[in-house]
Each structure stands twice: as C-alpha cells, then as structure tokens.
Image (cartoon, grey):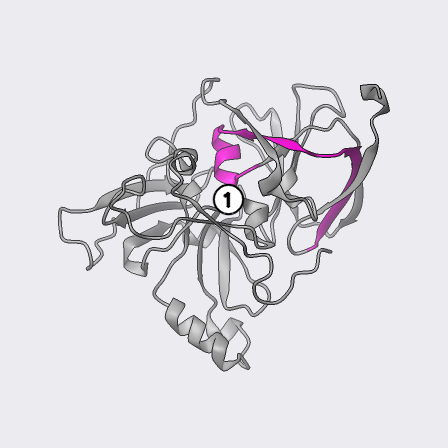
C-alpha cells in the first residue's frame, strides 16, 4: 500500500480536566519525538507532527498561549489543569505547522512508542536559566556544608526553586525514589518526581502557581499560570478539601504532610538532565493508571 493510501485512525485528545477536547485522523501513531529544547524539556512533551487538521470538540476557554524568544511557536496549555495540548509554528504552512503533544491523546500508551530524540540545544538563541532570588534550603537532616544544591524554575521564570539533597540524584549514593508515573494526570505532563521533605525545598513566586486537584483531593499540583510548567505537589488545604474524607485518606494525608513531591524537570538542565538519569536506569516507571478512583476520559 502506498504511503498516500495509508489507513488512518481517529484519535481523541484532551486536557486532564476536560475543558478542552479535540480530535483528528492520522495513520497509527507508533513513534514520537523527544526534543530537549528548553520548553519541550520542562513540559515533558512527546511530540508528533501528523500534518492533519484538528476538530475542536469542546473549548471552555481555559486554553492559554505561551510564547518566548522570537515567538515563532505558540505553545497551548490548559490554564486550569496545566496540560500541554499542541503548538503551532510560523516556520511551516498549515497543517504541517502543527505539533501535538501525544501525552494528551486518550488511550495512547506513551511508554510503548518508539522515541526519536532530537538535540535542539545546539540551535540559537540559547536558553538562559532564571536566578532563584529566594532563600536557600537548610534542611536539618543534612549537616551544614554538606549535600547537593540544585536550582531551577518554570520556563518563564515566574516561579523558581532551590532543592537540597544529601547526595546528587545521578550518584549511586542517592537512595530516594525518582519516579515517572502514568496515571491520568502525570502521563499528560511527563513529570519526573522526587520526594524531598518540606525543608529541603524553597519556592519563590509561589503566587504565580495555579493549583489543581481532583479525585479525593488529597493533594494539589501547582503549575505556572504563565507558561504551564508544573513545579510541585502539596497537601490540599483542609478547608479546600472534602471534610468527609475517609479514615484511609486521612492517614495518607498525615503521612504526606511533610513531603513536597517536586518535578525534576524544573531543575536547570545544565545542572541535571533527566534523560541522563533515564539512561542510568535511575528513573523508575510506576503504573499509576489503576490507582485510586478510575479516571474517565472526557
């Protein structure tokens, strides 16, 4: 069968909260691009460029557009749940100017796709990391003068972070978990989770975070309201949560209250590259699709 006669498949994609849904038809998706440019890296994009037209099924007006540098790309994300959906470029003519974040495609097993890695860091202009103006963490568990300090930010720099751990993440001495989860929300963002205590992490610009929670509302996830990069997770304040939580959920919250799950993609790429951690087999993939309440695709 000639390429022009390839059979196509109908795909449906959505942000996590369901405020934005679109569909398209394309040949079966078997591979995707992992680009290490600054924005693709921080947002965990798994990109496809099928050269098709999109059909917008639902649009509640939550989509924001983020641009930077020469503003040749329009990166779209849901301002409510933080999901990156697709981007359009001035470099090509429609429909070849469309790049879809395959992570938001429903029922697509991201981990089964063939990954084609593209090194975009060599193309100008270079991305300049943002300076963290806030205090440096001084956790009680790490003696003064010891430990490894990391710095980072969302892409636009409105939110910055400093993280101190006892041993570097890339070293054999680091004993904590480094996790990639494929639950309904994590798979859409490609987050790489680590689990520092509250005193190991300082955040500046926290007022620029949009908080999102769902299901039992045990925790909420904070992403930058300007560029959409997810930064961390924290327990949902009880006054905003369900006062009728089960005993099991309450125990989980209690054990979670001093932990601040942090997205390693926030760390400056020059200090730590999560793709290197993957090659070192230091990132553990955790099946999260069937945990807790079942998520229903919108």
Viewed as shown, does residue 114 lie left or right of 141? right
Tell me the residue at 57%/48% (across/down): 187
* Residue 85 visible here: no
Q: Residue at x 50, y 44 (%)?
A: 229
**Dot 1 lies on which element?**
loop
Q: Label 1 neighbourhood size at 10 Å, few (<14), some (14-19), many (20+)? A: many
Range of magenta residues: 18-45
| Residue that label 1 marks | 229
Could you tell me which residue is drawn at 70 percent across and 53 percent down?
19
Residue sitting at x 31%, y 59%? 197
Can you give x and y, in whole percent of width and height, for residue 41 in the image? Answer: 49, 34
In the rendered image, residue 142, in percent from the top left (x then y), is placed at 18, 54
Q: Please state, as top left, top right, bottom left or bottom right, where the C terminus lies in the image.
A: bottom right
Residue 22 is covered by the magenta coloring: yes
User: Could you say where residue 262 lies in the image, as x and y percent from the top left?
Assistant: 40, 51
Against 30, residue 209 (above or below) is: below
* Foreground pick, 206 / 267: 267
92 over 17 or under it: above or below: above
């Amino acid at each position: 069968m000639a390429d022009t006669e390839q059979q196509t498949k109908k795909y449906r994609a959505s942000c996590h909260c369901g405020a934005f849904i679109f569909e398209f038809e394309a040949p079966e998706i078997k591979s995707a691009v992992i680009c290490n440019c600054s924005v693709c890296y921080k947002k965990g994009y798994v990109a496809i460029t099928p050269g098709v037209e999109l059909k917008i099924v639902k649009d509640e007006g939550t989509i924001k557009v983020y641009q930077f540098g020469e503003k040749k790309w329009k990166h779209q994300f849901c301002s409510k749940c933080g999901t990156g959906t697709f981007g359009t470029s001035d470099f090509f003519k429609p429909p070849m100017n469309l790049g879809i974040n395959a992570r938001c495609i429903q029922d697509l097993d991201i981990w089964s796709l063939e990954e084609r890695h593209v090194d975009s860091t060599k193309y100008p202009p270079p991305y300049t990391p943002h300076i963290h103006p806030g205090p440096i963490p001084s956790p009680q568990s790490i003696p003064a003068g010891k430990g490894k300090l990391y710095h980072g930010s969302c892409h636009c720099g409105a939110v910055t972070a400093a993280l101190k751990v006892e041993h570097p993440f890339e070293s054999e001495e680091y004993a904590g978990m480094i996790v990639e989860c494929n639950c309904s929300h994590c798979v859409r963002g490609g987050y790489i989770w680590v689990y520092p205590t509250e005193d190991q992490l300082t955040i500046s610009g926290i007022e620029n975070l949009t908080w999102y929670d769902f299901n039992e509302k045990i925790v909420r996830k904070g992403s930058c309201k300007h560029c959409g990069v997810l930064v961390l997770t924290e327990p949902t304040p009880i006054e905003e949560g369900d006062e009728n939580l089960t005993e099991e959920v309450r125990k989980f919250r209690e054990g979670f209250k001093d932990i601040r799950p942090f997205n390693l993609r926030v760390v400056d790429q020059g200090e730590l590259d999560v793709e290197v951690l993957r090659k070192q087999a230091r990132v553990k993939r955790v099946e999260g699709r069937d945990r807790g309440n079942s998520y229903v695709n919108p």
